[in-house]
Structures are given as C-alpha cells and as structure tokens.
Amino acid sequence: MYWLQNLDAKAEFDSVFSMLEIYVNEARLAGVPAGYIHADEDSIRGVDAPMEKLVYSVEDSFGALADENGVCLSALNDPYNQWTEITPSSQSKGQAYRLAAKVWDKVCETKTLSEASDILSQAGCKLHGYCAID
C-alpha cells in the first residue's frame, strides 16, 4: 500500500477506489491470494461517516430514519404489532443509506409506511419487516 503515501487528501473517493482496485488486481495477478488482499467499497466508505441523519414521520402513521445504521421504517398506528422494516444483513448499512438518500425527497412526500417502503425498495434498499412486539 506504498502508493497511499502520495495520495492527495482531497481526492474524490471514486477515483481513489478505482486506483485501489487496479492495485488489488495487479497483486492478485502477481500471485497474492484473494483472501490476503481485497477492496471492499462499503468498508472503505466508512471515511464518509458520519452520515447526515435523514428523518421523516407522519403523525399517527409511521416514522422513517436513515443513517449509518441503515434504514428503519416504524408503524406508529399499530400498537399491537408495531410493524418495523429495517436493513437486513444481506445489504450493508452504508449502501442502504446511500440508496435511501437518493430518494429521500420522495419518501418525504408519502403518507403511509407502505408507500415509503415501496419507494425505498424500488431504489434498491432491501428491507426486512418484522413485528417489533416479539
């Protein structure tokens, strides 16, 4: 990783990550086992943190939140089940946040949890629903 010594601190993430991928691929071609070196965008993107917390709610209906812990939708009008949808382990929390941020203005136009869930799902957010009472 000697090339990091000459890295411009103001460089854009995507260009730096592209360079990293090139070096990782060159190392693999030189015989370095895949388990020894890899470029994981979601882990590396931790430098983008903290992420601005995105919050929206409709009184007596639902609340929505997106931050570095992923995406969460919670029913406020369902005292018996407290339906909740969250980012599952099959998607990184950072990736879910970035996808949600792209459509958050549309989420803020919704009136129901179902509408917000549909918008986020169409944007690529994976959501896992469960009864929060359990």
Image (tube, grey):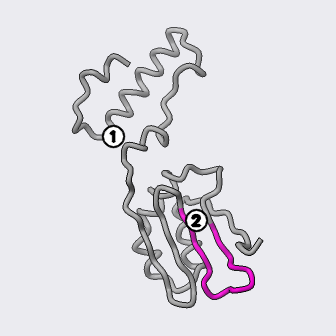
The quarter holding residue 87 reads bottom right
| Label 2 CA crowd tier, 10 Å (few <14, some 14–19, many 20+) | some
Which region of the structure is painted magenta?
Answer: 71-85
The residue at 44%/56% (across/down) is 98
Q: Mark 1: which amino acid? A: Phe
- Residue at 68% across, 86% down: 78
Q: Which residue is mark 2?
A: 121
Percent position of residue 112, x then y: 57, 84
The disc at residue 70 is: none
- In terms of image quadrants, where is residue 85? bottom right
Residue 109 location, x and y as percent?
44, 82
What's the residue at 59%, 51% (across, down)?
91
Side of 107 where 16 appears, left or right: left
Relative height, residue 106 to residue 5 (above, below): below
Q: Position of residue 8 (x, y in %)?
A: 22, 31
* Mark 2: secondary structure: helix
Circle 1 sits on which residue?
13
Q: Is residue 125 left or right of residue 81?
A: left
* Residue shown at the point (50%, 86%) measured from the top left: 58
- In the image as oriented, which residue stretches furthest toward the top? 30
At label 2, the amino acid type is: Ser
Q: Which residue sits furthest bottom?
A: 60
Q: Which corner quadrant holds the N terminus? A: top left
The residue lying toward the viewer, choosing from 16 and 81, is: 81
